Image: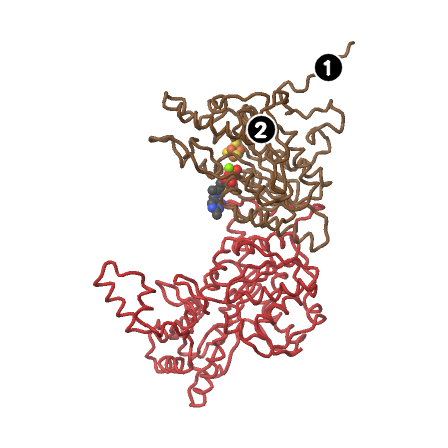
Chain colours: A brown, B red
Amino acid sequence: MGYTPVKFYQTGTHTIGNRLLPADARTVQSDDDRANALSCGHRACQGCGEALGARYAVDAAMRAVGGDLVAANATGCLEVFSTPYPETSWQIPWIHSLFGNAPAIATGLAAAMKAKGKATRVIAQGGDGGTTDIGFGCLSGMFERNDDVLYICYDNEAYMNTGVQRSSATPPAARTATTPALGAAPGNVFGQGKDVPRIALAHEIPYVATATVANLRDLEAKVTHAMSLHGARYIHVLVPCPLGWGTASHDTIKIARLAVETGLFPVFEGGNGDVTGVLKIRAKRPVEEYLKPQKRFAHLFKDATGAATIARLQAIADRNIARYGLIDPAAEV
Amino acid sequence: MLKQIEGSRAVAETVALCRPEVVCAYPISPQTHIVEAVGELVKSGALAPCEYINVESEFAAMSVAIGASAAGARAYTATASQGLLFMVEAIYNASGLGLPIVMTVANRAIGAPINIWNDHSDALSQRDSGWIQLFAETNQEAADLHIQAFRLAEALCLPVMVCMDGFILTHAYERVDLPTQQQVDAFLPRYEPRQVLDPLDPVTIGAMVGPEAFTEVRYLAHYRQEQALEMIPEIATNFTAAFGRDSGGLVRPYRLEDAETVVLALGSVLGTIKDVIDEMRDAGVKIGVLGIVSYRPFPAEAIRAAMSHAKRWVVVEKALAVGMGGVVSTDVRMALDPALHQVGTAAIAGLGGRAITKDSLRRLFDTVVDGTAEPLHFLDLNLPVVKHELERMGSLRRSGPIAENLLKHLGAVAARIA
Ligand SMILES: Cc1ncc(C[n+]2csc(CCOP(=O)(O)OP(=O)(O)O)c2C)c(N)n1
Ligand code: SF4
Ligand SMILES: [Mg+2]
């Protein structure tokens, strides 16, 4: 029988972690010995981007440090769906304290390990609300002190656990329970919100990266790299939420990829204040392609009045593309 | 070793002898000297291994302590007043998780109006937080209580607040007998956590708990506080055996034998009260004092027993339950035998640092003894000033901010720290 080459990037990305690749090129998830840190039985919605992102990120961190890892978790979907009493989906030492203090809990964990002369590493994780809003003071403090913590933010662009309310990571025009699609300017307000990855960079911490669940290989690689470093590190992962965004469960990856390919969510990494690497896109896709499948943007397509708002969103994407130099016709994505 | 030393310094040096492994510091008067001194001991290497973390808020201070404690480290922090309130969510969390953190509270009033001086509003606001709360009468006791606090906290897996009056104790230079490292090491065993985040034996801490078990979790928190009622006197007895002096315990009776009137209080004001009681005893009045060291758990039985022969009582309270009256007196009333019909007064005193003088106390106690005291009394309340402001408010819609109006009315006197 003849040899048939397998085209691994049939999805057009590096999404698949294929066991047919050489060992050193395989994903953590394709490894039989993966940690399964967030194991089955949790209560996340079907197609939850956060569950997917957390599983890949934490398993990658586990492999990077040989399993010698503890985690702190902010209140939010990830915490609630993973620990319905008396069960837990976590196979690693894991603590949930409060909504707004996960970075400080992690600081305490890291301090204890240091004082006790242990090599155990520490990660903290939270949603966008827990990270960019209520936990922001603690996050900035942890960054500023350069505490030995990797903080991972799973950004689904709203307070999902409490029923999809607006956070400072909610994009303009998006409908949430507190930014309804009503009135003259339906959805979330333009000109607000925080770019926490860039704020993290401004803290001059050793490592900052963004990633999405559309490119899990990239996410794994970034977590792995982050764990090879010490000091404060930050990874901001875009994780679509079918429930909050009004998307089909099977479209989570596709939506995340469109966020990247439109330029609305720039994927980059850097450290010590500078951006050092950018995930390029072959060709820019119009933002409509990303917005249209999402019910939270449905009001933009109801009638002609949405066009002006879509143009403003396109301008944001274009600004990202220019700022990060996102376009490269030779890019794989 | 006997030292003439500032209260804060004595506490810091004692805390260091307890070998905390993680200390988090965020400054607020009158706690600052404590965390500064601990920081010095860590920086100089005298206290090692210890991670000293300059956090960005009290909320972070308590959160870092929670993380450290959950990783098996002995954790310590200190705060006061607004700082205590700023960390409230984490305070409840620490006790809910059962983490034996020890915290000094340098008691101070709560604003608005902002006020840096001493009263007990801060600590008493946290009476239901699940923390054990011990109140020191002197700097010696403040220092000693920290050693006992770590032992108690770790034995029960409950956090402990050691409360000491801001400025009155924290900034007072007094003679304090500081123990040796060997003495403290012998008294305070290594911290063996009941739960710890350990990759070799992974556990989940802080899971979601619903109605099916929440009551039981809370009951166990209460149960452990009840255990503390037995353990606090035991530890105090052991402490006396090891260090040769009395410190701690649940309550501290003073000239209580045959006392028909009992004065109850927490903290440093007990010193002044005892002086007044001595004078009244000399004058033949059957009056005594019951100092409350342990406010949480509340030693109801010990108080009932100590006051079985009392006819009247008064709590000198450095806090006010606005809209209700006394804080501690409410608990005292609950503790007493209703069949005895003992008549009680809540005397609100020393708010925001107002000096509690012997003369004022004497006048108050005289009214308690002769049965003319009101159930709720505000010691040294300046009634004319209050009346004046009430009239202003009655006649003017835009009467302005109350605190500033009072200060204006008082004029130059306001600048004086009375
Ligand atoms: C101090 C406090 N305020 C509010 C809440 C309610 N609350 C719990 S989870 C949550 C939303 C979490 O949103 P996010 O951090 O974005 O995570 P997600 O659920 O979206 O993954 C909120 C508002 C809380 N638990 N604590
Ligand atoms: S609401 Fe969204 S984030 Fe939460 S579990 Fe469902 S899909 Fe995941
Ligand atoms: Mg969210």
Question: In the rendered view, would you say B250 is above or below A79?
Answer: below
Residue B260 at what x, y percent from top left? 42, 82
Is A38 situated left or right of B307 in this image? right
Of A173 and B408, which appears nearest the observer?
B408
Task: Output the chain of dot 1.
Answer: A
Give the quarter of the figure containing the C terminus of chain B: bottom left
Question: In the rendered view, would you say B298 is above or below A136?
Answer: below
Q: How many marks?
A: 2
Residue A67 at what x, y percent from top left? 71, 41
| Mark 2, residue position | A325
Whether residue A115 is visible here, answered yes or no, is yes
Whether residue A88 is visible here, answered yes or no, is no
User: For numbered disc 1, what is the local secondary structure?
Assistant: loop
Question: In the rendered view, would you say B363 is above or below A110?
Answer: below
Question: In the rendered view, would you say A2 is above or below B175?
Answer: above
Give the quarter of the figure containing the N terminus of chain B: bottom right
The image quadrant of residue A152 is top right
| Mark 1, residue position | A5
Is B236 situated left or right of A130 in this image? right
CA separation in Å, label 2 and label 1: 33 Å
Of B276 and B203, which appears nearest the observer?
B276
Residue A37 at what x, y percent from top left? 65, 37
